Image (cartoon, rainbow, N blue to C red):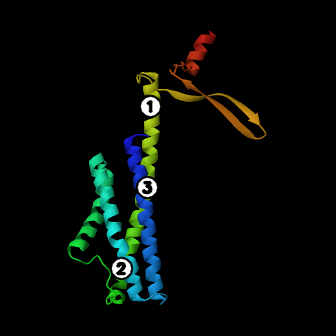
Amino acid sequence: MNGEAWLFLFAVVVAALLLFTMIFFIIMFSDLECDYINPIDLCSKLNQFVIPESVGHALLAVIFLFNGAWISLLLNLPLIGMNVNKIINNRHMYDATEIFRTLPQHKKECFFKLAFYLLSFFFSNHSNIATQVHDRGTSCRRAKGTASYPQLMLPKHTKHYGGLFHMQEVMVDKVEQIPIKTPSILASEAL
């Protein structure tokens, strides 16, 4: 795996952690609404995850910046801006005296972040797979020593065992051009 594949693998792990953090926040807010937890306990439990969540997301964006993953960085900038704005204005921590008044706003924010981290998880997973597939294709050409013609994986033969097909693949270095015989060519050959 190359560096870009490791980057997106790290992004998948971070997105999964942030996703589970938002699920925890939503469960805790639901517990507060149903009076299973009091506001002081809720705020003490959630406040310990607010800064690590923001730092983890910012760290991921910095890594995207240093590796030149511009699309991933641009997708993450709006949420980073929102987190930075909340920290600068000192509105990032939950206050037990105002939690019931601001609960709908906090829930909307958590659902927004949940959707964002879910999309980020799938985007990073797709980018990781695409990078590894691209890396595998270029490493096959590098191993052969040339990239002047494509290498294809074509089935050599197929065996039938009880309803299952087993294909043995063979590496083809060159694709031979087979002339296509149109009906007019066939008619001229028959004469």
142 vs 167, left or right, is left
- The part of the image, by quadrant, that contains residue 58 is bottom left
Please tell me whether residue 30 is drawn above or below residue 148 in the rendered image: below
Residue topped by disc 3: 12
Please report contact status of discs 3 and 1: CB closer than 8 Å, yes or no.
Answer: no
Hey, what amino acid is under mark 1? Ser
Pointer 3 or 2: first along the chain: 3
Residue topped by disc 1: 139
Percent position of residue 46, x then y: 38, 77
116 vs 156, left or right, is left
Mark 3 crowdedness (10 Å alpha carbons): few <14, some 14-19, many ≥20: many
Pointer 3 or 1: first along the chain: 3
- The answer to whether residue 123 shows anywhere in this view is no
Mark 2 crowdedness (10 Å alpha carbons): few <14, some 14-19, many ≥20: some
Residue at position x 55%, y 30% in the image: 153
**Label 3 – label 1 distance at C-alpha:** 24 Å
**Label 3 – label 2 distance at C-alpha:** 25 Å
Point out which mark residue 106 bears: 2
Hey, what amino acid is under mark 3? Val
Q: Which residue is at the front of the view, 101 or 190?
A: 101
